[in-house]
Amino acid sequence: MTAGTTIRHPGPVALVTGATSGIGREGALWLAREGFHVLAAGRHAARGAEVVEAISAEGGTSEFVAFDVTAEAEWARVMADVASRFARLDALVNSAGIFLARPLSETSLADFRRLWETDVESVFLGTKWGLRTMRETGSSGSIVNLSSLAGLIGLEDCAAYCAAKAAVTHLSKVAAIEGAAFDPPVRVNSLNPGVILTEMITGAYGAGPEVEAFVKAGNALDMVGEARHVAAAIVFLATPRSRMVTGTVHVVDGGRGVD
Ligand SMILES: NC(=O)c1ccc[n+]([C@@H]2O[C@H](COP(=O)([O-])OP(=O)(O)OC[C@H]3O[C@@H](n4cnc5c(N)ncnc54)[C@H](O)[C@@H]3O)[C@@H](O)[C@H]2O)c1
């Protein structure tokens, strides 16, 4: 993104973090299909270029925005740029995150803090700067925070991750109250997928039939959760289709969390 260059995009504008892989990448593609100009945020320029190319190949518009979501100065810089170039921010999808599968008794404080910084502090910062930017630009925006089923139920050996995702879900509810009072209102929802076959899962558990079986295990629909299943919910929550929906916990888990 080049500071100071005003872009006149006829449609809405979305910023998606974690957009170079998995759920964020798929969400970026789906939002572009909906007519959003997508700011695809990530840390890897080559992967960002691939996402921009994939969106362009489908006739959409996007650009890669390089930043680390844990740094507040970078949120401030990116949002100032969004406000000056587009004068609107219609959707913010906070999808960047990391996972840790480790027994609590074996989790170091450094591991816990690293997870908290990436999964909670980044969503706090994104929601804060998203609310401010949407209010200041008069945007009737929507913020979608990627939490997890792990933020609602305890998953074995995932205490740090579960705690972080519970914080994201709860922070989103309180942010929804704040955003509802804006004129125009800004909506904030928590999106809580079950197990979705992305690099987050293959990085932790490997790939292959056993991992696919793990992804389906306990899933009432007996489906392998894929990023596109979550992207459909991102589109719903990010667009005015859900204009009556805020402060909710939107679960996409194939029924895994149903007891
Ligand atoms: N895959 C699942 O089973 C699952 C289930 C529930 C919730 N989620 C959540 O969905 C979100 C997306 O996960 P995914 O499955 O697409 O995983 P993924 O690993 O494919 O994507 C996560 C992205 O976040 C980026 N990222 C990590 N730290 C960052 C930082 N400091 N700054 C900028 N970018 C950073 C990574 O580079 C990566 O592109 C995460 O918040 C995750 O916790 C995933």
Image (tube, rainbow, N blue to C red):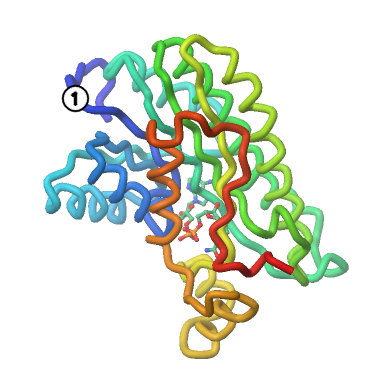
The image shows residue 132, relative to residue 166, as above or below, that is above
Q: How many marks?
A: 1
Name the quadrant containing residue 91. top left
Which quadrant of the rendered structure holds the N terminus? top left
| Residue positioned most to the bottom | 209
Residue pictured at 44% horizontal, 50% vertical: 233
Placement of the C terminus among the 4 image quadrants: bottom right
Q: Which residue is drawn at 52% across and 65% down?
A: 200
Q: Where's residue 158, x and y in %?
A: 74, 65
Q: Is mark 1 on a helix, strand or loop?
A: loop
Amino acid type at mark 1:
His
> Farthest front residue?
244
Kindly indicate the quadrant of the structure image that contains residue 215.
Answer: bottom right
- Tell me what residue is drawn at x 45 percent, y 10 percent: 136
When asked about the image quadrant of residue 156, the answer is bottom right
Where residue 135 sits: x, y (%)?
A: 48, 13
* 180 relative to 57, above or below: above
The image shows residue 243 at horizontal and vertical percentages of: 45, 29
Q: Which of 158 and 64 is in front in this view?
A: 158
Crowd around label 1: few <14 · some 14–19 · many ≥20 (10 Å): few
Which residue corresponds to the image point at 50% horizontal and 22% vertical from the top-left?
186
Q: Mark 1 points at which residue?
A: 9
Q: Is residue 240 left or right of residue 256?
A: left
Tell me residue 28's x, y (percent): 33, 47
